[in-house]
Image (spheres, coloured by chain):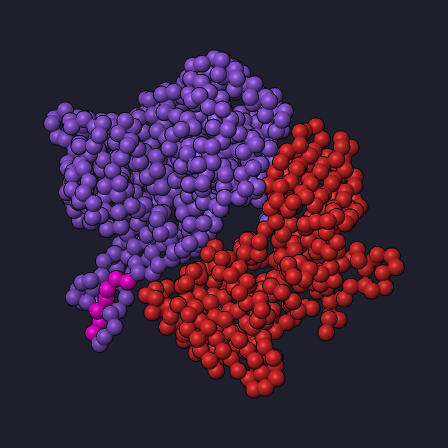
Chain colours: A purple, B red
Amino acid sequence: MSPRSARSTTPRNPLRDPQDRRLPRIAGPCGLVLFGVTGDLSRKKVMPAIYDLANRGLLPPGFSLTGFARRDWADEDFAQVVHDSVKEHARTPFREEVWDQLAEGFRFVPGDFDDDVAFEKLRTTIQELDQVRGTGGNHAFYLAIPPAFFGNVVGQLRKHGLTEADDAWRRVVVEKPFGHDLQSARKLNGVLDEVFPEGSIFRIDHYLGKETVQNILALRFANTMFEPIWNANYVDHVQITMAEDVGIGGRAGYYDGIGAARDVIQNHLLQLMSLVAMEEPAGFDALALRIEKQKVLSSVRLPDDLAATTSRGQYAAGWAGGEKVPGFLQEQGISPKSSTETFAAVTLHVDNRRWAGVPFYLRTGKRLGRRVTEVAIAFKRAPHQLFNPAATEELTQNALVIRIQPDEGMTVRFGSKVPGTTMEIRDVTMDFAYGSTFTEASPEAYERLILDVLLGDPPLFPRHEEVELSWQILDPILDFWVAQDKKGKRPEAYDSGTWGPASADAMLARDGRVWRRP
Amino acid sequence: MTRRLTGTNSAAIAAEFVRARTHAGSPAMGMVMTLIVVIDEDAVDSALEAARLASHEHPARVLAVVLGSSRGSADVDAEVTVGAGWGGEMALIRLSGEVVRHPESVVLPLLLPDSPVVAWWPGAAPVDPASDPLGQLAQRRITDTQTSTNPSTRALHVQCAAYSAGNTDLAWTRLTPWRALLAVSLDQHPLKVSAGSVSAERVNPSADLLVAWLASRLRVDIVRSVSDGPGVTEVVLETAEGPIRIQRDDGRHAIFSSPGNPDRPVALKRRDVPELLAEELRRLDEDNVYAATARYLTRSLASRPGSRRSPIRKGSKK
């Protein structure tokens, strides 16, 4: 994840100096073609990120953005859509001069995904941009559309000669879901792989673009004090939580049949887990990181009794955060018989020397207590022959908690003497918060990832192998849940605004543990 | 929240920091550095505003020191602020009387333990910041020879001659976007540069540094010409295939021209002090490229024919 990964620079540029760390990484001449310009992803994430990059001076002169959608729009209408999205969602202040030069590079191509005329127009549009804006034939295709259409679009791109260029790169960017099981993931990859070489396919898992996630590696490998205890000798178990306080909102069409495990555990949580559990990589380049992540994911073993070690639930109607909210089965567009889970918790073992015997508990859900993502490392209890049991009654396990979002930071929990004349120990926490640093100054995950796509810098993007390994871990659990459905055992209902179903608590209680309240 | 202390000393100011933090309910400190700001009374507001904005990215203990008249009996007044938009905490310390000659005695006890110290002179700077009593406390010393009120070519020459590891000048920081674009232009056109020129308003330390940087890196003559500004208005690098030119007339938009390519617009806004300061605080080790540029500038001034008034050498500053 270093800014200076192995990129060849021939011949040497006299204005570049490895010691000159002020100079930012600026992408070479290029353009981006965005499919699905009206979706939430485009409007809330991609467009604001492009503006923020331009505002930070990280986009090349002449950068161009072409929208493609089934709308009867002119270039100006598209520019207006981007303008509104930038005004509403960009992190950096709106500056006329940045907007002006960026907006000059906006184009719009109306059409369907199977419309030959439209793709021919797209080709001429790109060629014209190369001439007028100097984008140099380098273009990335960002598919912010449902995966079902990937085949159509990349097929059309190839048919119209858009996937290859002389002395220039063509890249494709896709977002999750990368399939809904191993088989479909392979099929989806086949579709992309047929047209683009693996090095040109960029899969976005936006969690990997987050500063706090990258900081896991800094925390572990730039310090001395954590790594010696980062193993089964000292760690009791690990809890990884991604909780949302909202329901599915308007995403019924997407969510029904997908569920929490596929939506979050397969990608974000397993990626987080591999960063927490992996061995020290030989470098921060894509290959070294991938090797270590794959080793961890290949070492994951599922417990034998999935009924006792997994949990799933659906939120029920109730009150969450002072508001009356409907249950999942009452949401618009959801069948009252749906067995899609909105809460999923799984137990995973990593069968290697470092982690043997340390369970990793992963959970995610909607309509939980609050919005939070965190990784908690719970350490073994100290033997307390020195202190009598009464003195340490209030002492729990030492813990190190990495808060991914919100309130980014880190907490260390340890025991300390209660002031007074008796020897009484209780938990205290020591907190490090990044504070406001992360709200304004640091780039948003999408900025980092889009810039990396344009630079062709791949360490923060999961490769196909990682996606497949993740599905191999999750598939048996999903199959087990389908079998449960057939036996009439539906996902357990849990009250909205709580921390999930009773079976999740029972899952840890069996091991003599409890979930943290994040 | 701000609290005023009159006729005070370092210990009382330190105690007030702790009290205010505990009072705010968060005794934890996430601060990464101490920032000493040495200012004149009339620049207090603008300098503190810049420091406050920079403290969002770099939570710091900010010690703003106003040196008053050194006549009369010694007096230390302080305003201690915690919260209120600061990403850390701030003490505005006004010194008058004899203590003005010993400001380090007030500041030293207030430095955060074991973390970096930065000294910043938003206005007039000492001739040799590294041997200044307050500058000696810091490993990073930031001057600004291109202050909006009083840009000075001579001040730049003085600072470059007095360069010492850890010194840096905001005139250099202002150049980062220019330098980034120029570096990118040679990434895209890996050509040998045969000559070059920099146009800027008459007094512009940044332009002089840019000339020195280009000349030292490219090993060719760079012509400095005068334009109406604002700031740097044009840089041209001559190559065998034609010129690479970045032209900015309004201080906001630039046109990037290069051989075989259409002219491309690029936003190149002159940045404000808070942004410059935040960039400067990102790295606190020696800036080797600035060091080389400052040395080059000093050497080329000394060797300029007919120049009797050679720049002040290090060691002869006082």
Q: Residue at x 47, y 36 (%)?
A: A83
Residue A192 vertical placement versus A214 (above, below):
above
Q: Position of residue A367 (x, y in %)?
A: 23, 41
Residue A230 vertical placement versus A166 (above, below):
below
Q: Position of residue B91 (x, y in %)?
A: 48, 70
Q: Kindly give the residue lying farthest to the right in the view shown.
A: B306
Q: Kindly give the residue lying farthest to the bottom in the view shown.
A: B73
Q: Position of residue B64 (x, y in %)?
A: 53, 69
In magenta, the rendered stretch is A422-428
- Is A416 placed left or right of A175 in the picture? left
Instruction: Please indicate, yes or no, whether residue B198 appears anywhere in the rendered image.
Output: yes
Residue A270 vertical placement versus A139 (above, below):
below
Of the pair A489 and B159, the residue shown nearer to us = B159
Q: Residue at x 49, y 13 (%)?
A: A117
Q: Quadrant of residue B66?
A: bottom right
Residue B204 vertical placement versus A178 (above, below):
below
Q: Is residue A425 magenta?
A: yes
Of the pair A126 and A280, the residue shown nearer to us = A126
Instruction: Please indicate, yes or no, whether residue A158 appears anywhere in the rendered image.
Output: no
- Is A472 placed left or right of A195 in the picture? left
Q: Residue at x 79, y 39 (%)?
A: B194
Q: Position of residue A491 (x, y in %)?
A: 16, 33
